[in-house]
Image: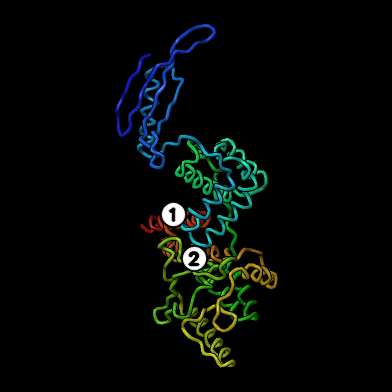
Amino acid sequence: MPTNKTNEGCESYWLTSEKYRRKIKKGYTWSFTIELGRDSSTGKRKQITRRGFKSKKEAELAAHQMTIDVDNETFVNEEKNILFINFITDHLHIIAEPSVKASTFRGYKSAVEKRLIPKFGHMKIKDLSGKMISTYYNELLKEGLTEEFIQYIHAILKNASKTAIDWKYIKNDFMNNVKAPRRQKKNVETWSIEECNTFLNRMRDQKDHIFILYYLAIYTGMRRGELLRIKWKDIDFNKKRIFVQHSLYYISSQGLVLQTPKTHSGKRNISITNEMIGELQSYKVKKQKQLLKVGLKLIEDHFVVSAFGGEPVNPNTIHKQFLYDIKLAEIKRIRFHDLRHTHATIMLEIGENSKMVSERLGHSNVSITLDKYSHVTQNIQDSSAENFSKALGKKSMDQ
């Protein structure tokens, strides 16, 4: 029986031809055996054998690839019969939780528990396939879920499949060539200048800290968590700046937590006007009087948006409060986050430079701003074209 020993790379393998019999004809198949040294615990030799190759060349190629995989520590001898529910739970707590912010992990965990485990939890991860995942995405679309949410699910599965390969649970990436549905561009809901003024004028009759929250949201474009995190020491009245360093979140298992921005550009300073300074100083005087009545003194470390005592407001209470106040003001219903869009839209509509607006919002790149508010910039472009044409026409008539 022919044999051939080859030493390539870090591993050695043996090729052997084995006689076999079929109903119609006789012939040989080729097999190979890879030597992996000895088991440190038992002292026994470790070998891997693969059989059934039609030619010597085919066996050589397979053996060579396997030695490369072994050397690169990417070889999986036998896929594990582990259930998806057990794997994804380990992935959540071993890989995801230590590497992301608490608020991000909360959303990650919720999506896994509410969507992925009910669908795939009973299956072995080695049985998952790209076709299966793509079919699931179509089911989610038919259910009415957004492309954005499905892309979020897609990102979770991509990270999970990489972990499964790293842990040598599976040989092949079940997310290979799986594509998430393209996100559909949505119209941004905003208020006009008139609607902003109507709302703020009505809110002056509400609690002081609620009014200042809405006022700052509209006038600065800050996110909810950023607004609720601002302390008096973060406002420089002389330089007319608000310094954004952190965001406030509520995590069910931890309570209120502070987190740094996701990108470097999230840490920024926002310019404020004399009018805004006047509103803030007036509000500060009211807070000082409020605290003095109970024997307390306002300090720079107190939160600006605080119901009483300088303590922060739970971000989870804002949504319900905002919907109530919109109804009270009798204007178009939007989300609290849309106040940020409102600020950006108005800034662009009055001719402010998109780069400046991007920096004010804390976007990592001006292209994000231009893409998100393309409906506004298109109108500005049309107006600019008209202005250019009028200017050039006037110039030619004057000559």
With respect to residue 122, does 257 lie above or below? below
Image quadrant in which the N terminus is located = top left
- Mark toward the start of the polypeptide (1 vs 2): 2
> x and y percent of residue 53 in the render?
44, 19
Pointer 2 residue: 347
What SS does tag 1 mark? helix
Q: Can residue 183 be seen in the rendering of this structure?
A: no
Q: Which mark is residue 367?
A: 1
Residue 76 visible in the snapshot: yes
Q: Which of 92 and 130 is in front in this view?
A: 92
Q: Image check: 7 left or right of 40?
A: left
Q: Nearer the viewer, residue 212 or 150?
A: 150
Label 2 SS: helix
User: How far from the left and from the top, in percent, is residue 38?
Assistant: 37, 36
Local crowd size for mark 1, using a 10 Å CA cut-off: few (<14), some (14–19), many (≥20) = some
Please state which amino acid type lies under the numbered disc 2: Met
Q: Residue 289 carries which label?
A: none
- Image coords of residue 285 (percent x, y): 53, 88
Residue sticking out furthest to the top: 24
Which label sits in the foreground, 1 or 2? Answer: 1
Residue beneath the point at 58% across and 44% down: 84
- Res. 131 image quadrant: top right
Whether 323 is drawn above or below 387: the answer is below
Q: Which residue is drawn at 49% across and 7% down?
A: 25
- Front residue of 226/124: it is 124
The crowding category of the residue bearing disc 2, from other C-alpha atoms within 10 Å (few below 14, some 14 to 19, many at least 20), is some
